[in-house]
Image (cartoon, grey):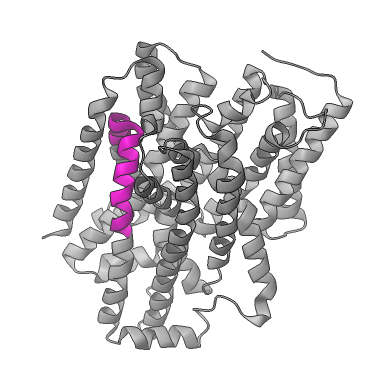
């Protein structure tokens, strides 16, 4: 079977699954339509939600970027995954009970806690959308590297056609299609990572054990060393609040949890997913270590950057049928991140920004919103194609605003002091400014670890929020 045939069959299957998922959506009306499209009417099973969470967080940054990290350094990237275990326990134990079954989007739920103004809710949503578009746009570019190599087309064409395919099946089937396709896609890209462990030694002519031993001797498989204890602590501690921000304050992930059948199901989903994340991270770090060993005995062609190394190897050394399988895996990783983002951002636009209520308005807006969002993501992907180190770029973007969202959540749900009042557009933006100020100082003045951006951003947001409420009169914009 040719590689192209494998890819075509994969795409046909994804669209068939989307059409199957659409059957119930088309009979829903009004608010029921919104819950059906964006929360799957609270019918998601634990295994479906876990598969979708893993598929969404992995993206092509894992498929291509994590092997590049191990190739250039070691296994220390896993530190952030270790911190995520505690981070997701915090989400399950303390955040989910506050938000489950309380609304359609997280930002609607936060702003409803103290009867915030309409513009307070919109400001909160806009902060999230700004960050999400930039971080996922980077992931979209990463996922189209192999598509571009395989079909020998420009990366711009690859970005366009990948976005178009994802846009269509996401619009057709809503969250049900997103979750079901994500579960299938998760097995595809994991299968691609496993297949690489057999193909790399075969191409090299050495055994898996020999290549692994070579990488281990060079320190490529090191997770913790006594010479770099600080890096371990930074990664693990940074990973705790970073994961709370990315998985607990991001509608993309929260949407899957709010769509679960019960609070218990949602809690199991987010906590158990952390252990799957560690396994997937180790799998692709191992691919990077094997690639390093391979290219110690085989010259690496000039002009191949680390971020494109795995894509280059697949294109030039994998058998034709497996090449198609790997391309399907990268497409799966990319589309699983892209589809959930389009669906999550669409729910924010329709529910939080525009407050649509009429069935006809909701259906017409759905198509307009998804097209507009897809265009924004493509534009960011075009810009990201000019950057190196796509893995760290994608993560750093998320760290820049996560602390501000956590600060806004804390002012409404946790902090009970009198000066933490209702959100309006001005104090929302003021809190976000405090987040950006401290993150900017850490990143460009102190040049501190990006893993601490969420901590500093939250501290800056809370400080500026307190200053605003203490020294400025209440200003509302309704």
Q: Residue furthest toward the right? A: 471
Residue 323 place in picture, x, y as percent: 23, 63
Q: Is residue 430 left or right of residue 79?
A: right
Q: What residue is drawn where x is 20% and y is 52%? A: 7
Q: Is residue 361 above or below residue 127?
A: above
Q: Is residue 187 left or right of residue 62?
A: left
Q: What residue is drawn where x is 41% and y is 32%? A: 39
- Of 415 and 12, the residue lying toward us: 415
Dominant secondary structure of the residues highlighted in magenta in the image = helix
Q: What residue is drawn where x is 41% and y is 47%? A: 140
The image quarter in which residue 117 lies: top right
**Is 174 included in the stretch rendered in magenta?**
yes
Residue 179 place in picture, x, y as percent: 34, 42
**Is 172 included in the stretch rendered in magenta?**
yes
Residue 144 place in picture, x, y as percent: 35, 51
* Tally of marks: 0
The image quarter in which residue 442 lies: bottom right
* Residue 461 visible in the current orientation: yes
Considering the image in quadrants, where does the N terminus appear? Answer: bottom left
Q: Is residue 204 left or right of residue 350?
A: left
Q: Is residue 272 above or below residue 423?
A: below
- Of 468 and 44, the residue lying toward us: 44
* Residue 398 visible in the current orientation: no
Considering the image in quadrants, where does the C terminus appear? Answer: top right
Magenta range is: 166-189
- Of 462 and 89, the residue lying toward us: 89
Q: Residue furthest toward the left? A: 1
Q: What residue is drawn where x is 74% and y is 27%? A: 427
- Of 178 and 135, the residue lying toward us: 178
Residue 236 place in picture, x, y as percent: 62, 64
Q: Is residue 293 above or below residue 450?
A: below
């Amino acid at each position: 079977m040719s590689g192209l045939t494998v890819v075509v069959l994969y795409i046909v299957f994804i669209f068939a699954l989307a059409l199957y998922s659409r059957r119930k959506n088309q009979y829903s009306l009004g608010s029921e339509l919104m819950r059906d499209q964006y929360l799957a009417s609270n019918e998601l099973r634990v295994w479906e939600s876990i598969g979708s969470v893993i598929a969404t967080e992995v993206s092509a940054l894992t498929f291509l970027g994590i092997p590049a990290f191990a190739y250039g350094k070691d296994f220390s990237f896993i530190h952030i995954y270790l911190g995520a275990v505690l981070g997701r326990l915090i989400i399950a134990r303390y955040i989910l009970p506050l938000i489950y079954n309380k609304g359609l989007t997280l930002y609607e739920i936060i702003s409803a806690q103290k009867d915030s103004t309409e513009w307070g809710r919109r400001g909160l949503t806009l902060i999230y959308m700004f960050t999400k578009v930039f971080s996922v746009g980077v992931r979209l570019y990463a996922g189209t590297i192999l598509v571009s190599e395989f079909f020998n087309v420009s990366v711009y064409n690859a970005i366009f056609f990948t976005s178009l395919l994802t846009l269509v099946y996401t619009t057709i089937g809503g969250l049900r299609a997103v979750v079901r396709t994500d579960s299938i896609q998760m097995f595809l890209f994991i299968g691609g990572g496993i297949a690489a462990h057999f193909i790399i030694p075969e191409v090299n002519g050495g055994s898996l054990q020999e290549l692994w031993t070579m990488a281990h001797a060079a320190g490529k498989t090191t997770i913790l060393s006594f010479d770099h204890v600080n890096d371990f602590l930074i990664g693990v501690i940074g990973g705790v609040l970073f994961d709370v921000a990315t998985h607990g304050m991001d509608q993309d992930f929260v949407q899957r949890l709010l769509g679960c059948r019960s609070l218990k199901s949602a809690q199991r989903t987010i906590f158990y997913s952390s252990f799957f994340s560690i396994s997937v991270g180790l799998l692709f770090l191992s691919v990077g270590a094997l690639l390093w060993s391979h290219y110690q005995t085989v010259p690496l062609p000039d002009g191949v950057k680390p971020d494109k190394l795995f894509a280059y190897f697949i294109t030039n050394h994998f058998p034709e049928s497996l090449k198609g399988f790997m391309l399907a895996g990268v497409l799966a990783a990319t589309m699983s991140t892209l589809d959930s983002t389009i669906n999550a951002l669409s729910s924010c636009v329709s529910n939080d920004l525009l407050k649509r209520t009429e069935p006809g308005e909701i259906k017409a807006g759905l198509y307009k919103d998804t097209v507009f969002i897809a265009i924004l993501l493509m534009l960011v992907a075009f810009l990201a194609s000019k950057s190196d180190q796509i893995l760290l770029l994608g993560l750093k973007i998320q760290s820049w605003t996560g602390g501000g969202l956590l600060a806004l959540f804390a002012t409404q749900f946790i902090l009970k002091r009198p000066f933490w009042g209702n959100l309006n557009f001005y104090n929302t933006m003021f809190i976000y400014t405090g987040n950006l100020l401290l993150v900017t100082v850490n990143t460009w003045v102190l040049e501190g670890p990006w893993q601490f951006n969420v901590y500093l951003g939250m501290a800056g947001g809370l400080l500026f929020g307190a200053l605003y409420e203490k020294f400025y009169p209440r200003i509302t914009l309704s």
